[in-house]
Image (cartoon, rainbow, N blue to C red):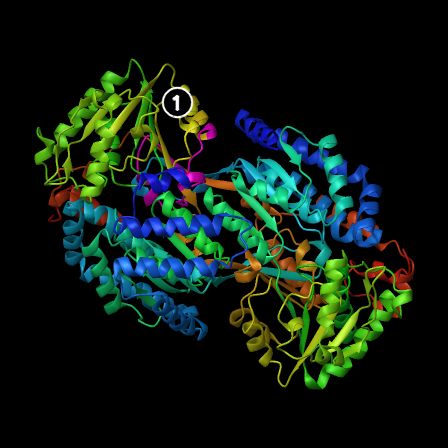
Amino acid sequence: MAIVSAGLFKHPTRSTGIAGVGLLGTFTYCHTYKINRVSFSSSIPSSYYCHATLSTTMEEVKSTFDADEAAVLVNKLRKTFNSGKTKSYEWRISQLESISKMVDEKEKEIIEALYEDLSKPQLEAYLSEILMVKSSSKLALKELKQWMIPKTAATSLASYPSSAEIVSEPLGVVLVISTWNFPFSLSLEPIIGAIAAGNAVVLKPSEIAPATSSLLSRLLGEYMDQSAIIVVEGAVAETSALLEQKWDKIFFTGGARVGRIVMAAAAKNLTPVTLELGGKCPAVVDSNVNLQVASRRIVAGKWVCNNGQACIGVDYIITTKEFAPKLIEALVSVVEEIFGRDPMESKERSCIINSFHFSRLVNLLDEDKVSDKIVFGGQRDGSQLQIAPTILLDVPEDSLIMQEEIFGPLLPIMTVERLEDSFAMINRKPKPLAAYLFSDDEQIEREFVQNVYAGGMAINDTILQVTVPSLPFGGVGESGMGAYHGKFSFDAFSHKKAVLYRSFAGNLRQGTRLTRQKNKSKSKPYSVETYLKLFLLYSDGLKTESMRTDPLDEGYGCPLFPYVMGKGK
Amino acid sequence: MEKSIAELRETFKSGRTKSVSWRKKQLKAFLDLVNENEDSIFKALDQDLGKSPVESYRDELGIVKKSATYSLSCLDKWVAPKKGDLPLLLFPSKAEVIPEPLGVVLIFSAWNFPITLALDPLIGAISAGNTVLLKPSELAPACMSFLIQAIPQYLDNKAIKVIGGGADVGERLLELRWDKIFFTGSPRVGRLVMTAAAKHLTPVTLELGGKCPAIVHNTLSNPSKAKVTAKRIVGAKWGPCTGQACIAIDYVLVEEKSASTLIELLKKCIQRFYGGNLKELNSISRIVNKNQFQRLVNLMKDPHVAASVVYGGSVDEEQLVIEPTILLDPPLDSEIMNEEIFGPLLPIITVKNIEESIEFINSKPNPLVIYAFTEDETFKKRILSDTSSGSVTFNDAMIQFLCDSLPFGGVGQSGFGRYHGKYSFDTFSHEKSVLHRAFYPELEPRYPPWTNFKLMFIKLAYGFDYLGLMLLMLGFRKS
């Protein structure tokens, strides 16, 4: 893995959906893209390499789902999409209702599958997976009509008389690749958006959470419209077969390394992508906070959140030198309160997903300059795939644990002289998906919001920003691109088609229509002054004399074309 | 090159470009640049493309001036954080969405509108507070050297740089890490740009082209409307850089019975606008270079295509001028009907019934725009719901480009991402969501150890069932 990543992809982060099984396959796959996608002047047709790769991958994994089959599948969905079925409001509503119904009826099975994959405690599973999906589908059902209504846009004097609107249209056939840490909600959240926007969807759940993957395949088959929503289970080979196809949108949740592969594959067909990646999400803790509440919220954003295996979980803490011991003490007491004296025995935490990740985490802990920094925890049990909640103090910044996304129950605490120094420390690293601040000082808060680059932020809390549908959820830089949740999910799967209606003459009907719309809209994008300026601006183009006398011009037509009436330059 | 990019990164890090006053100052300087150099810009455009000053003003200078003025007047509103609604449960909290600049952005522009397509995105990038490297197209050399010389004189040259050079420079630029790449050009290069961007997870906006159809329906029956229709078609075919525009009309779809009327009107209009024959042509741009010229001539070489020419067809290789040319029903499998024409050739495709035009359009990749001249409301609705394109304009052409309130951008083969007006600002911004919370009250049921009471609480909370929650808290509801 490390060798693969070192060459081309600089930030080896967590292994996700594609990379977990069949590492050899992954290697071949990346390697191909290295030759094929990134070299700019390659004259060899891209398909040459792709087919070669695919066949080797196929041999190794011995899958039955190949590119041909994927093509058949996409064709089938495209047929459905072209029939216009998925565009209708009724179809979208019926599918969203099916999702709600499915979640309600199969609650128990879903929780069991999550327990099998991640030993996720029942209530945590309920909280972070089932309820998220439920509230999202509920919101979509309630708001869909509103979302689908074309938005009126103001028109300018230059195009008077006219009216304009922005119509949301579905993109077509979309691919959703989800991941294993929240295998249920991270699969269904994007699907809700895709359906709400009227697309046909293929979901590829993560094979690293096999129980949930097969459950999703079974349930979606049972509840959803089979001609438009399909689940393809599988690992590297299946994913590469899918990525070979032409999609109208790819929505990917996972690691940055695979994100690059997905985007490079999408480039071949000019497919837009949304990449939901991760990053090292910092939590900055000021010394003036309510320590009890702050540490509970940090614990909630670290160990209670899938045992740290969450892309928006707290990755590390930055605090001042003198405050660090107090914070550690408070964190330890909250951990003991929640998970008991011996956290290894607690059933309230998820386990580490698999032995690959277990040993990755153990390696992070056992690095030379890191292992002596452990101030709490550190116990591990390979047979249970469990690592105790572990706090480390002042690990070197160049250690592996501070370089890659931890994605597990280890919490390094970094100290700075002044709290403001933390901003530079965060901005030195790639932009994280989330940044957290605990402080009572409004000045610090303002500076933090202004100066720290991150996908999203929560002040004095963790994780909760994800549950607010009015906030877009998505990364920036290394933490990804594009956003979703609530209306933003709908937008992520829609094309915003600009529509301009013009008439042939400045007749009254058009005129009044325009005025009415202008009165209705609260925001006034064009002030009178702007109109005047625009007019003056374009009146420069009216300087030719012949235009008013030209019989073709009879008083209508656009003021933009008359220049051509003036013969000669 | 590496050094100047490091400087851009340094400038961005200093935070200077983030301040609204810096952005406004740059936009004002930008307006000065355009106002004080009108003549040099006219000259450069004439040199590169033979554009007349009026056309240059309409399609280039006017547009960027308007954009910059508009951005200046709206900037305060755009940078203000937007409030997000919050559920009562999270009270007291505050949610907002704050636009933040992406960082160091790269803009590739194209040769057909060498000023607009370079400066319009630049306005967006500056408004959003980024530092910018602009790579104008080397195929419009006079405009490129104008930009290289003028921009450092007016704008903050530690934050906004222009780089000259050809494809090799482009390749080297793509090797580097950017926070956003904005590309205007062809799908072929668009793919290369996106592939290179994937390496650094750089978001891209691709403004590509496509075969933009114009459907002419029932507007020909009324003589004066027919005249306007013809004028607008001619204006949107040969007007913008003699058809070398991504939103120019590529071909026309019309019912068989109306084809001859339309052609007659178009001919009249062409003669009135641009003059009768090749020698007398004026007010029309030329073809950008020999390559493009040859490509266009080759499109007409196919004997079946050549036989379909009903007007024009003559060319002047020395002056790189092609007469406005109308073709009636060239074979559908010919090259001219399968690649973007990007020149002064206008195929007219006849259909039995205008409804067929929808299937015809759908059989091709998504165009950047669909134009439709029709007064039939049901047909308008059908076009909107049954076709997919970047945008749709009814009863006119090109003019949607001027509307700052409308997003401009493609879908499918015509690209993705959008700009103009506020959308330009958004394209170069990251929308950072920020949730501010207070320390009290605390929602205890968020934390383990888990109990049934907490489960019930959370269920009710997600359902925003406040009455139920109250009952639960008071112990009136079984957990």
Q: At x 28% / y 34%, what residue is drawn?
A: A406
Label 1 belongs to which residue? A422
User: Picture coordinates of residue A263 (x, y %)?
Assistant: 44, 51
Q: Is residue A257 magenta?
A: no
Total marks shown come to: 1
User: Picture coordinates of residue B181 (x, y %)?
Assistant: 55, 44
Query: Is A85 in front, or is B276?
Result: B276
The stretch in magenta equals: A450-479
User: Picture coordinates of residue A240 (x, y %)?
Assistant: 36, 58
Q: Is residue A475 magenta?
A: yes
Quarter location, residue A351? top left
**Relative to B297, residue A180 above or below:** above
Q: At x 42% / y 70%, what residue is drawn?
A: A78
Looking at the rendered structure, the kind of residue marked 1 is Ser
Quarter location, residue B440? top left
Q: At x 46% / y 49%, what residue is drawn?
A: A35
Q: Quadrant of the C terminus of chain A?
A: bottom right
